[in-house]
Amino acid sequence: MDQHIRRGISTVDVSQFDRGDISFIIICGALVLFMVPGIAFLYSGLSRRKSALHLIWVVAAGNAVVIFQWYFWGYSLAFSSTATNGFIGNLHNFGMRRVLADPSPGSPLIPELLYSFYQMEFACVTVAILVGALAERGRVMPALVFCFLWMTLVYCPLACWAWAPHGWAFKWGVLDYAGGGPVEIGSGIGGLAYSWVLGRRTERELLNFRPHNVSLVGMGTFILWLGWLGFNGGSAFGANLRAVLAVWNSMIAAAFGGIVWCFLDYRVERKLSMVGFCSGTIAGLVAATPTSGYVPMWASVITGGLVGAVSNYSTKLKFMLRIDDALDLGAEHAMGGIIGLLLNGLFADKDLVALDGVTAVAGGWINHNYRQLYVQFAYVCATVAYTFVVTALLATALDALPGCRLRASPEDEALGMDDTQIGEFVSDYVEVRRDYRDWTPPSAPNMRRKESISEAGSATLPAAAGDRHGLPDAALLHPANGGEKLDGLEVISETSAEAA
């Protein structure tokens, strides 16, 4: 049997593929994987310290869930070659069976085995962006179940629509180069829907919110920028001029997006914000995702400037909608993806698309293909509506199952997700758990009193990791507001705790 398998593999014809193209896409796939820790560090830096490791953990664990789902049936549901319904694939490639050296569904330049790996990394990045919706209030175990189901019911259909040869959007002529629909609208609108189901954080958590580590925000952004060159450059599926064009367009859109966002913030705050620059840079890269392999470089100047402005102002929409989109997934990823897809209808150039040597499209308005704009608009409407509705229904149904409640308790939110969900901290400024008897102290109001001081003299106050010196914010209240002195600090009384 083993000899038969070896003989079967030895007959596979790999001579049809250029080794340079294969090497290039392997490297690009690795760069896309590098975006996952970039997202994790970005999210961690943007959050409070008491919930900073929580987001790194859920991004890492979500990545593992996606790898399993993609191997199990995700690739088959998105790209199986025998499917015909235009909406979702079948199980022809279940468990990655029959995925080897046939030309890939996306391009004849690379084998299907490599294509499946590269597309898997796209899925990993999408879920990594999406789980930012958990910020400071989402439980991690139900979120992992959600990730597997969301990949199956939302991402795989979106990928099938846009990129599978039998997908309805692909056959209709939609231009979506590297994932304006599946990746950006999928993660941005999906994160918005998940945040809506989770509900808003308490007003105490919303007031005076500031990123705990802007250096991590900057580092995460530049890791993402590097990885995005593999994300967009590799979507030409070969070491060709179209890949170089995509890289150039990505650089231009990111630069202009960052500068425009930063100076719009300066107009109001009179400060040149690092977080603002990073936000605009990411918005520019998001808009370049669907456009970078289609449009001339001068169009990326317009793309970056436009998305920097629109995404900046779109951060106000969450207040109008009363959705606590803590990390602005809707404003940056959803709006960036929408803008990029619509601009394809205007600026897509058929001559530039042909630089890969295998792809032919009619182009956009600059090629007098006036139909393309309404095709792009209809595709945007379909992806936004499908993603929001299915994500919200899925999250609501999962939240109703016993043991799968998506949101942490108010007490856990006050302590911080790192303490209650992970048990570790990004920056452990306070010595905790050095004694094996130490553990998370109870958070009941009646434990916030003098009696909670142990005989050894160590306080068992429910201190949040992000609070000042490991002491709860309640300990800093003035006695006039119901606090009482404890070793030079005020501790909230039982009466005032219940009132709170």
Image (cartoon, rainbow, N blue to C red):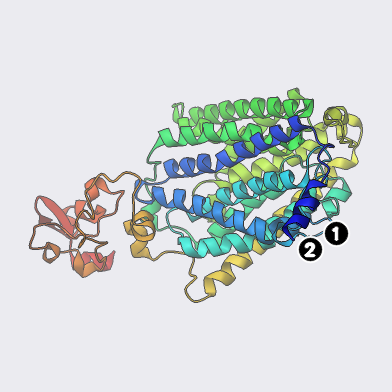
User: Horizontally, is 137 left or right of 398 in the view?
Assistant: left
Q: Mark 2 — residue?
A: 90
Is residue 3 in view?
Answer: yes
SS label for mark 2: loop
At a point 23% along the width and 53% down the height, the residue shown is 432
Label 1 element class: loop
Q: Of residues 446 and 10, which is closer to you in this image?
A: 10
Mark 2 → mark 1, Cα distance in angstroms:
7 Å
User: Left or right of 449: which side holds 149?
Assistant: right
Q: Residue at x 34, y 52 (%)?
A: 424
Q: Quadrant of residue 104?
A: top right
Question: Measuring 87% from the left and 33% from the top, which residue is drawn there?
Answer: 365
Q: Nearer the viewer, residue 260 or 355?
A: 355
Q: Amino acid at mark 2?
A: Asn
Question: Where is residue 338 shown, x and y percent of the image?
Answer: 70, 44
- For the residue marked with disc 1, what is the amino acid? Thr
Which quadrant: the N terminus?
bottom right
Point out the tag, 2 or 1, that comes first from the N-terminus.
Answer: 1
Q: Which mark is residue 82?
A: 1
Image height of 244 relative to 25, above or below: above
Residue 120: horizontal and vertical position, in percent? 66, 49
